[in-house]
Image: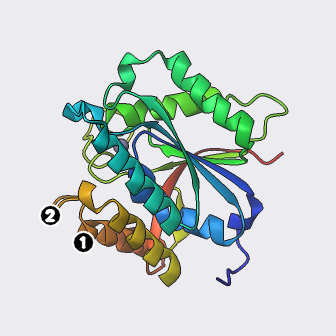
Amino acid sequence: MAMRATEQEAYTSILVVAAHPDDEALGCAGTLFRHRSSGAKVHVLFLSDGEMARGASDKALVRRRLAMAEAAAEAMGGLSTRLAGFPDNRLDAVDMLDLVRAVEAEIAEHNPDLIYTHHPGDLNIDHRHAHQAVMTACRPIEGRGVREIRCFEVLSSTEWAGPGLGPVFEPTLFIGLDDAAFAAKRAAFNAYAAEMRPMPHPRSWEVISALAVLRGATAGMPRAEAFFVSRRLVP
Ligand SMILES: [Zn+2]
């Protein structure tokens, strides 16, 4: 795919820290596809499999979820993935130090210059802890390679938090989705179809595409994914 020269190409190693398989697709599928299209490596760390809170003692559910994640990773241009295996919807019961070490291990292995993770104001407790773990693992110490941290929004969590529960998502970065990137987002959605819901649930394709149109229109583009830039360093 021919890409125009953009700042996307300034980053060569991208790490995504997501609480659950499907957060990365909802939050930044089209953007990750663009990174892959411009030649960057993209690795996704899932802190939890997203299944245990449903009482799933059956390992088959976890395997099914991970198979969805693999299919979505392929749809987004070929991402590598790893599951850390922390308990779903209970990251607040995990020592923050353990979460931080899991993120630090990925940073040590992949040496990312850009990280995508959750917004700190999400309703989902796992999302909030994922954000804190990333910010702790990325303390800006001289010589470290992470130059930018971007927070994505996840429908049915970011917009459901409500006032008083944390910072409101106020996007500061809009990444346009051309037809190929939007098709990749749709394909990633399809990979996770079993996790999605019918309209008017926010995790429906109608609402996901409506948000892409709104975020694009906010920035004078047909479609976009929006981010809050938590930190950007220009060495
Ligand atoms: Zn999630």
Q: Position of residue 127 (x, y in %)?
A: 40, 37
Name the residue located 68 percent from the left edge and 28 percent from the top edge: 139
Q: Position of residue 197 (x, y in %)?
A: 19, 59
Left or right: where 86 falls relative to 112: left
The quadrant of the picture occupied by the C terminus is: top right
SS type, badge 2: loop
The quadrant of the picture occupied by the N terminus is: bottom right
Name the residue located 36 percent from the left edge and 51 percent from the top edge: 154
CB atoms at circles 2 and 1 under 8 Å apart? yes
**Residue at which label 2 appears:** 200
**Residue at which label 1 appears:** 206
Name the residue located 66 percent from the left edge and 30 percent from the top edge: 105
Q: Earlier in the sequence, mark 2 or mark 1?
A: 2
The label number, if any, that marks residue 3 in the structure image:
none
In front: 31, or 67? 67
Q: Is residue 71 above or below residue 92?
A: below
Marks 2 and 1, how far apart at CA: 8 Å
SS type, badge 1: helix
Q: Position of residue 192 (x, y in %)?
A: 33, 59
Amino acid type shown at disc 2: Pro
Amino acid type shown at disc 1: Glu
Mark 1 CB lies closer than 8 A to ligand 1: no
Which corner quadrant of the figure contains ligand 1?
Answer: top left
